[in-house]
Image: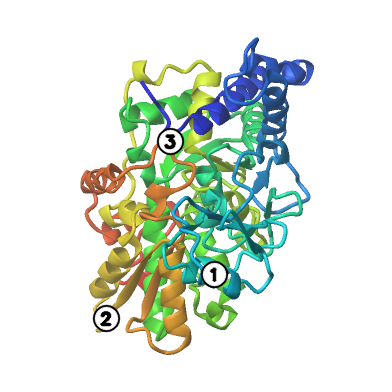
Amino acid sequence: MRLFDTNVQELKYRVLREIVRLEHAGQLESKLATIPKTIVPGPKATMRCCIYHERAIVEERVRIAMGGDTSDSCPVEVIDIACDECPTRRFFVTDLCRGCIAHRCHAACPAGAISFENHKAVIDSNKCLECGKCMKVCPYGAINETQRPCIRGCKAGAISLDEERKARIDSEKCVGCGTCVYQCPFGAIVDKSYIIDLLRMLRESQDGKKFKVYAAIAPSIVSQFSYARIGQIVSGIKQAGFHSVVEVALGADITAAKEAKEFCEKDFLLSSCCPSFVKYVEINYPGLAENISTTASPMVEIAKLIKSTDPDAKVVFIGPCVSKKSEFRLEKTGGAVDCVITFEELQALFDGLDIDVESLSDGELDNASYYGRIFARTGGVSAALEHVVNESGGGKKVKAEVCDGLEQCRIALLKAGHGRLDANFIEGMACEGGCVGGAACLSHGPKSKSDVDNYARQALESDVRGALKVFGSLAGAPDAPRSDPQSVR
């Protein structure tokens, strides 16, 4: 059974699993230096030039898996010694060059980087400005461009190359989506992990005697862990030491109700569910930042709900999102969430603790609506908002611009900034497909959306109003009117 899409994910998982195993046994500090040899036993190298290079990279992976550089708020880091296999030249001349006498490439180059050897064009990479003008004018299309996967994948423009041609992340531009982590074929970019914090939190809880630890799971979980039922995953999480498992989808129901009220009060609104989209707007379109919904994300809403009933609780978000590792530390979240781990890390947790999920009976999980659950995929936020607004009977109509990935977000925001967007609500998702396409999913594929929709249809509550009955009773307001979304504000 293959759990992951790529061998890079497999390597990350093996490091995390070993850290979990040693920390749980109380041996992490004493055996930390043994992890590289455990992961890369040798004697022959399987990934790099030699086992010593491989072990040095694993050592860096261990450091990042234990929290990485805490002085940098960026949720991802570059492993310099792993970033050494990508092409160093962006533009190069292929065999299609016919050695023409027009020399348009030479004439177009502003840096004088093109010369000719045996009548063929040659690009001096030390002089090349990477402007691409030569490529555009070549009549044979003989000049090609090779862009590094991390740079091509980063739609925020946060990745560049340093003087040694290593990837560098500009934390002022980075929106934390984690696309670069999944796109890098050599695993040279890694998201920081807080799995050690989680393990120590679970241990300090003393099996719930000191405080209870709640797992808040994202609805996109149903498109993952294909080897087990969602009920078995719930049981596995509890066996790991969590007191209870709650759906973030219920937080999405709360968000939908609050955001609907805010939408009815404003002429134009941007969604606040995706922290990478929010940060992208704040960095690149500050003039539109005032239109971002002030409603908290579903992750924060469900955590606030849990702590309203159990003030001493600790809440751990489990999902596909790298960006959440930044969001939960933001001042505006008020410390509602105590830790974040990804689906990749949850799998490492299960296996590091020797939890056989497939052998477990099903745990119960049903405390959200159809609409709360479809927040996990593109278009779900807009559908939920439209549903609540229509139910409120205020007469206002939602005309949504659904943005699937940061590139579509950029286009919509450009239009909005120039007053040319024919919409009054922008649903922005940094990951293509929505949360089901998150960088830290176990697997990425087209089935994810259908999995979420099928799971949503299994919800006992078909609408937000029904789900909010749970919210009303938990929040101590069972008599609050249910028909008006403003009642949960």
Q: Residues within 10 Å of mark 1 (few under 14, many from 20)?
A: some
Residue 309 showing in the rendered view: yes
Query: Where does the image place residue 457, in percent across and percent down from the top left?
Result: 21, 48
**What is the number of the mark on residue 397?**
2
Query: Where does the image place residue 226, in percent across and percent down from the top left?
Result: 32, 30
> On the image, which quarter does residue 372 sit in?
bottom left
Q: Earlier in the sequence, mark 1 or mark 2?
A: 1
**What is the number of the mark on residue 442?**
3
State left or right for residue 397 relative to residue 93.
left
Query: Where does the image place residue 377, in percent across and percent down from the top left?
Result: 34, 54
Q: Which residue is mark 1?
A: 103
In this view of the protein, which residue sits in the foreground, 464 or 431? Answer: 431
Figure quadrant of the N terminus = top left
Mark 1 vs mark 3, CA separation in Å: 50 Å
In this view of the protein, which residue sits in the foreground, 150 or 125? Answer: 125
| Numbered disc in front, either 1 or 3 | 1
Q: Is residue 125 above or below residue 83?
A: below
Q: Is residue 155 above or below residue 208?
A: below
Query: Where does the image place residue 472, in percent across and percent down from the top left?
Result: 38, 58
Q: Residue furthest bottom?
A: 419
Instruction: Identify the residue at horizontal 49%, vertical 29% (top origin).
Output: 7
